[in-house]
Image (cartoon, helix red, strand yellow):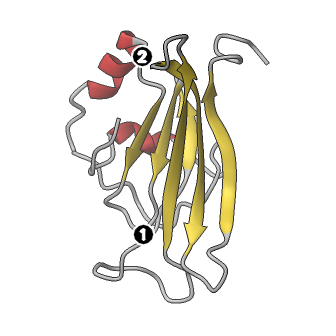
Amino acid sequence: AYFHIPLPEFSSFDSTNFTGVKQEGISSASVNSGFFTTMVSAGDVKAVFTGHDHLNDFCGELTGIQLCYAGGFGYHAYGKAGWARRARVVVVNLEKMEKGGWGAVKSIKTWKRLDDQHLTAIDGHVLWSKSSAGKVS
């Protein structure tokens, strides 16, 4: 799922349970609509990607759903001096069907690209994989 304003559940993370950085508060709605609970109940949402807080670029797992910030990548809005602008890349691999069509999601991977001289890739990881779904580690 992709949307702009983060859910209140993004506040569930601290420095011990996410990948990336949290440099500002979570600017979510003051009233929890229950949307996150609905996504968990549906069972088919594996990741949520949001923006709004440009100095946050973290991903963390909560109740089986990865919650990820995009990171601030444009120069049209606020940023932080000395912190490279960045964009989150998301790659979804689909199963190939016998007759050439595309099937179910096989995996969801993500990383960020920095707006530096080398377009450096950082914080790459698999958010969800069909082969590891349901396994307890």
Location of the C terminus by quadrant is top right
Note whether 79 is above or below 82 in the view shown: above
Query: What distance separates the C-alpha of mark 2 from that of mark 1?
Result: 28 Å
Residue 21 picture location, percent across and down: 58, 61
Residue 136 picture location, percent across and down: 75, 13
Location of the N terminus by quadrant is top left
Residue 85 placement, left or right of 38: right
Residue 60 picture location, percent across and down: 57, 41
Query: Residue 72: which disc?
Result: 1
If you read the primary sequence from the N terminus, does the residue marked by circle 2 or circle 1 appear first?
2
Amino acid type shown at disc 1:
Gly
Q: Quadrant of residue 44?
A: top left
Q: How many C-alpha atoms fall within 10 Å of the one at disc 1: few (<14), some, or many (≥20)?
A: many
Query: Residue 50: which disc?
Result: none
Amino acid type shown at disc 2:
Asp
Note whether 16 is above or below 132 in the view shown: below
Note whether 49 is above or below 24 in the view shown: above
Query: Which residue is most to the front?
Result: 99
Please name the residue shown 58% across and 60% down the image.
Answer: 112
Residue 87 picture location, percent across and down: 48, 64
Residue denoted by label 2: 44
State whether residue 63 appears in this view: yes
Please name the residue shown 65% across and 10% down the image.
Answer: 134
Q: How many C-alpha atoms fall within 10 Å of the one at disc 2: few (<14), some, or many (≥20)?
A: few
User: Is the C-beta separation of discs 2 and 1 under 8 Å?
Assistant: no
Residue 60 placement, left or right of 68: right
- Give SS at disc 2: loop
Please name the residue shown 26% across and 24% down the image.
Answer: 34
State whether residue 16 appears in this view: no
Residue 8 placement, left or right of 117: left
Please name the residue shown 72% across and 12% down the image.
Answer: 135
